[in-house]
Image (cartoon, helix red, strand yellow):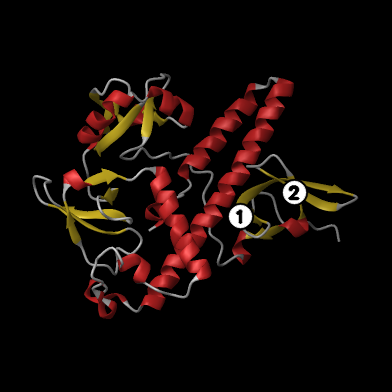
C-alpha cells in the first residue's frame, strides 16, 4: 500500500506517450503517490505515468542529449553575437556561412556557432536585394529538397554531375520506389519550410480521405509511367504506404511534443516574471534546445 509504483531515476512515459521523463522526486499525500520529473515543471499522479520499459511501441526523444547539430541551410549566429548567417556547407570542424544581411561568406568553427531560433530576427536580418545572390551562393547539394519549374511536387536531390549543371531528383517521400528524373539548376529552387509543410499536409490528407493510391505521387511524370515504381525491387505499394504512414505518425507525435514544450516555456516565462529568478530563463533556453532537436520533417526521420 505504501510502496510507490515507480522508483527515483526511473524513465517513465507521460499519458499516451507524448512525453518521456525521469522520476526526480516522490511525494505521498492524500491523493496517494505523486511524482515530479526532472525535465518538467509539473506533478503527475501514478495513473498518468507508465514505465518506459512497458512501452514497446513508444516513439521516444532523448531530451537529455544537449547536442544541437548545425546543418546545411540552418540559420545560425556566432555565440554571443547577433549577426545572422545561413550555412552553405559543413566541412570537418568548420562551417561555410553566408551573412544574410550583406551576402558575404566566411568560414567559422562549428563549435562556436549556435542556432538563431528567433524567426523575427531572421526575417529582419534578410536583405531582400541579396536573396537571389545568396541563393546562387548556396547552390544545390545532394539531399536538398527542391521545387522544379512546371511541377507541383517537392523533390529530393539524389545525384548530380561533376560541374553541377544537371541534377537527379526523386519525388520527396517516395525516394525508395520512384525512378529518377533530370532537373537543371535554372529550373530549380530550394523548398522553404512552408512549401515542405504544405506538401506533407497534402500527403496526410490523401491518406485520411482516400484509398491507397500512388497516382498522386507519380502524376508529375506525365504520361504516367508505372516503370518509375519498381515494385519487384522495393515491395508493393501497401508496404510503401505502411512505412510512409509510420513516418507521418512520428511527425504528428513530434509536433505534439513541441506544442507541450512551448507550454512549458510559457510557464517558465510567467515564473520569471513573478520571481525574476534567472534559472527560469536558463530553462527556457534549455527547452528551446530540445525543440530544435526534434525532427519535424520526414527527411529528418528517414
- 260 with respect to 80 (left or right): right
Identify the residue shown where x is 17% and y is 45%.
Answer: 185
Total marks placed: 2
The picture quadrant where one finds residue 123 is: top left
The picture quadrant where one finds residue 262 is: top right
Residue 154 position within the rendered picture, expressed as x and y whole percent measured from the top left: 33, 54
Q: Which residue is mark 2?
A: 35
Residue 169 position within the rendered picture, expressed as x and y whole percent measured from the top left: 23, 57
Quarter in which the N terminus is drawn? bottom right
Residue 198 vertical placement versus 104 (above, below): below
Cα distance in 3D space between marks 2 and 1: 17 Å
Q: Which residue is mark 1?
A: 18
Residue 235 vertical placement versus 136 (above, below): below
- 295 with respect to 31 (left or right): left
Q: Looking at this view, is 75 or 26 the one in front?
A: 75
Chain-order first, disc 2 or disc 1: 1
Residue 239 position within the rendered picture, expressed as x and y whole percent measured from the top left: 40, 76
Identify the residue shown where x is 20% and y is 63%.
Answer: 180
Amino acid at each position: 500500500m505504501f510502496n510507490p509504483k515507480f522508483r527515483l531515476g526511473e524513465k517513465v512515459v507521460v499519458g499516451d506517450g507524448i512525453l518521456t521523463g525521469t522520476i526526480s522526486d516522490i511525494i505521498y499525500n492524500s491523493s496517494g503517490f505523486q511524482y515530479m520529473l526532472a525535465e518538467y515543471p509539473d506533478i503527475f499522479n501514478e495513473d498518468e505515468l507508465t514505465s518506459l520499459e512497458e512501452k514497446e511501441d513508444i516513439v521516444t526523444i532523448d531530451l537529455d542529449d544537449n547536442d544541437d547539430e548545425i546543418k546545411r541551410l540552418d540559420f545560425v549566429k556566432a555565440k554571443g553575437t547577433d549577426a545572422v548567417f545561413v550555412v552553405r556547407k559543413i566541412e570537418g570542424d568548420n562551417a561555410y556561412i553566408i551573412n544574410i544581411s550583406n551576402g558575404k561568406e566566411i568560414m567559422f568553427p562549428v563549435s562556436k556557432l549556435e542556432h538563431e531560433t528567433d524567426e523575427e530576427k531572421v526575417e529582419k536580418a534578410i536583405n531582400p536585394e541579396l536573396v537571389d545572390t545568396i541563393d546562387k551562393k548556396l547552390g544545390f547539394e545532394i539531399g536538398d529538397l527542391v521545387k522544379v519549374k512546371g511541377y507541383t511536387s517537392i523533390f529530393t536531390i539524389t545525384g548530380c554531375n561533376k560541374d553541377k549543371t544537371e541534377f537527379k531528383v526523386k519525388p520527396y517521400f517516395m525516394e525508395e520506389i520512384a525512378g529518377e528524373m533530370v532537373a537543371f539548376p535554372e529550373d530549380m529552387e530550394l523548398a522553404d519550410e512552408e512549401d515542405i509543410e504544405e506538401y506533407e499536409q497534402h500527403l496526410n490528407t490523401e491518406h485520411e480521405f482516400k484509398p491507397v493510391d500512388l497516382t498522386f505521387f507519380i502524376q508529375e511524370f506525365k504520361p504516367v509511367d508505372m516503370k518509375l515504381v519498381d515494385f519487384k525491387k522495393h515491395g508493393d505499394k501497401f508496404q510503401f504506404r505502411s512505412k510512409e504512414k509510420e513516418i507521418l505518425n512520428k511527425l504528428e507525435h513530434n509536433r505534439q511534443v513541441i506544442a507541450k514544450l512551448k507550454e512549458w516555456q510559457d510557464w517558465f516565462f510567467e515564473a520569471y516574471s513573478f520571481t525574476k529568478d534567472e534559472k527560469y530563463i536558463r530553462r527556457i533556453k534549455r527547452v528551446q534546445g530540445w525543440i530544435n532537436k526534434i525532427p519535424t520533417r520526414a527527411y529528418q526521420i528517414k
